[in-house]
Image (cartoon, coloured by chain):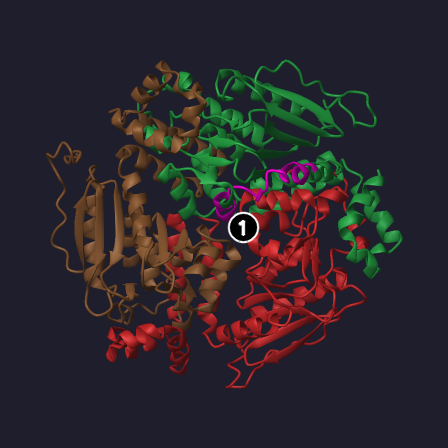
Chain colours: A brown, B red, C green
Amino acid sequence: MFLSLNDNGGEFIMKYEGFQTFTTEQDSGILTVTFDFGSVNVQGQEMLADLNSLAMRLERDRSTKVVVFQSANPEIWVCHYDTELLKDMSTVAVSREDAQLLDLQEVCERISKVPQATIAKLEGFARGGGHELALAMDMRFAARGKYKFMQMEVGMGILPCGGGASRMARQTGLGRALEIILSARDFDADEAEAFGTINKALEPDQIGEYVDTLAKRIAQFPAESINACKRAVYESIDKPIEEALKAEAYWLYQATSKTPAIKRFAIADEQRLEDDIENQRNWNDLVMKVQEIN
Amino acid sequence: MFLSLNDNGGEFIMKYEGFQTFTTEQDSGILTVTFDFGSVNVQGQEMLADLNSLAMRLERDRSTKVVVFQSANPEIWVCHYDTELLKDMSTVAVSREDAQLLDLQEVCERISKVPQATIAKLEGFARGGGHELALAMDMRFAARGKYKFMQMEVGMGILPCGGGASRMARQTGLGRALEIILSARDFDADEAEAFGTINKALEPDQIGEYVDTLAKRIAQFPAESINACKRAVYESIDKPIEEALKAEAYWLYQATSKTPAIKRFAIADEQRLEDDIENQRNWNDLVMKVQEIN
Amino acid sequence: MFLSLNDNGGEFIMKYEGFQTFTTEQDSGILTVTFDFGSVNVQGQEMLADLNSLAMRLERDRSTKVVVFQSANPEIWVCHYDTELLKDMSTVAVSREDAQLLDLQEVCERISKVPQATIAKLEGFARGGGHELALAMDMRFAARGKYKFMQMEVGMGILPCGGGASRMARQTGLGRALEIILSARDFDADEAEAFGTINKALEPDQIGEYVDTLAKRIAQFPAESINACKRAVYESIDKPIEEALKAEAYWLYQATSKTPAIKRFAIADEQRLEDDIENQRNWNDLVMKVQEIN
């Protein structure tokens, strides 16, 4: 079902076209998505549709390994959810059984589960649904002085309902998740790093290179082991340790059945590479050289 | 069932009276609870009874939005559990089925679930059950030089059994939770911030204003969205992501059915406030101005 | 079934002998395990067998309270999993039902559950399975300049499958767990402390004393309360809060039925020690003096 092949194979490169709210660029296994819609990158019907279509393609694409989400807007990464959609929300208190997932929840969850490594490169505001989209990505890096995030929903009379209430304490402790969601105030990049909602705060002139280096590194690894890693980590926190370990074992064979792992281990073992202390010192580079074995 | 109305409405203000171990003060949606009992604020039968009564009232009160817990004792926030109660604990190793919740567990859990935002303002020691009570609150702020916490139970021959063993790793990583609980040593405010058991360490002359500003901000938000936020966040870590998202959707409609949210969104949309970059820059203040729409 | 008695009783001291990959030293309730195997402390069949035998003995030993794991190798704590074993892994994608736990998973999980407090004293590299073994311990301390960790599995074509994918986000937030596992790069001691995968980064000339002080403190506490604390904390994150609290209550009586806790509380209560503010100030030392009551 996965017709697209490796970049080098060049046969079936997935097409990323027809989006209204962002542009895309493909290069060596990295897809860069640049939000660029209206004055503030509002998160409305168009962006939801685009993100859903993007996820649909990513799910079928094995040549793209990493997706970087950035913004063309100098001040805003992705804006909050469109009031044009919010104003029509139901005011009927449904039962737990009748509660259906919301559109933004569905889209963010689908983005969260794509087989690629996803990176939010945050060089502007990300508030409300914009921040919830960032939380649905695997990793987040933010530029000092430019980045601010806020969950303002409690102040409007609701709660973060694009997965934000569910995902916040999966990044930081319960107390800090509650402070973020109950205070409805701006947090800057350093506060976000201290709380752990982002991986790292970086200077504005360094974030580009940092994310680029990381994306290029991951993009050289096998698509199926990237996916297996993601799936196992996400499953791990939703399960007791015994079941998490079983899921880990399951994903191992999903990977070995599709990647050159065993071939790589066999060659390494034949040459007894592990016994050489010099190799042990240089694992950071060695892991990249291994990519030549396919 | 919720007879108390908004402060401004002024009709039914919940009465907080008849407590032995703390005094209370109500002001503009904020209830300040000041522990003041004996020489060390011991956590005995009287305090448990008072906290239970307090929770009972808070559960029925919709005019109080925030509860700040502080101490009149210059050195101790809340002391450990009373040895007068500890000495009579059972020494029979009951089965898992027969294990009943302990009094301190019940009280802390009830405090944890009140519909208000709860803040521990920690300007003295909080050890054993005192620290477990702090962990049952939504947020914790501590004064440098004055605050120390310890879970000394392992050294006595038991474990933190007022929810402390259960809640510690919900605030910090597993390794740090184990170090705290197995080392039975004092940790200061900066260590607590680094580990994440408190939200933030503050200078003794700044903690008052910091907590006051936070409490006043939250107290202006709708009671029902504060409750919905709390409930969704606490549920989120006890459930797999799919179920957490459903709970989030459930709480959304619990909020929209009782708050002025839709009215606020409709007005914002009518004026297309979101499209103005100046509004996006000023969300930190804007969210407070929104409170005028009811 | 637990024939070994307290050190001081001296009757049945568990023998730790017959290991190929590490040496052991017993002193006052502390067992020090020093990895010393070949040029790089490879994690192969011999080490797995040794760790399994070690766990078997620890499970039956009540005189040992703390186990410190260190390395005689100046550069490596424990190396990654042996390619000699990796090269023979199955490439058949089994179903979730048929996925069995892997040997390294089983051994790490067994080490994780021993009744003693376990400490990884990391003064060299810990990568792949070596790092996963460290993650299976209760606490981790690392020496600046000497320690590096990496999960390189994604780059080989697999995932961390010695419990690493399952345990990473139990120590740090989801985003940072994913960065560690997807980037397959070296992280140093300060990065590890910031992410929370270790408890603390220390100077190379200070880590010895720090770990020693901690181990000696814990080793004075009752064996059964150490075990109860561990079990309750590990269970807590695998269960909803209501069930975690019940487990906490269960472990309380497991402890009181076997430790001198009630005797200690009774004496403390008789003397009303808690009412004296001087005692409250000195809890850090007081908890050690309590150990004289048995």
Q: Position of residue C236 (x, y in %)?
A: 56, 44
Region in magenta: C191-212
Q: Horizontally, is B112 left or right of C286 in the view?
A: left
Does the magenta portion include A12?
Answer: no
Q: Residues within 10 Å of mark 1 (few under 14, many from 20)?
A: many
- Badge 1 amino acid: Arg
Q: Picture quarter containing residue B274?
A: bottom left
Which one is in front, A58 or C202?
C202
| Chain of the residue on which disc 1 is drawn | B
C177 vs A100: above or below: above
Q: Picture quarter containing residue C203?
A: top right
Q: Which residue is mark 1?
A: B170
Q: Secondary structure at mark 1?
A: helix
Q: Position of residue C130 (x, y in %)?
A: 49, 29
* x 74%, y 68%: residue: B74
Does the magenta portion include C205?
Answer: yes
Q: Horizontally, is A60 left or right of A206 in the view?
A: left
Q: Is residue B93 visible?
A: no
Q: Quadrant of the N terminus of chain C?
A: top right
Q: Horizontally, is B42 left or right of B263 in the view?
A: right
A20 vs C284: above or below: below
Q: Horizontally, is B80 left or right of C273 in the view?
A: left
Q: Is residue B272 visible?
A: yes
Which one is in front, A1 or B72?
B72
* x 33%, y 49%: residue: A210
Q: Picture quarter containing residue C142?
A: top right
Q: Position of residue A88 (x, y in %)?
A: 27, 70
Q: Quadrant of the C terminus of chain C?
A: top right
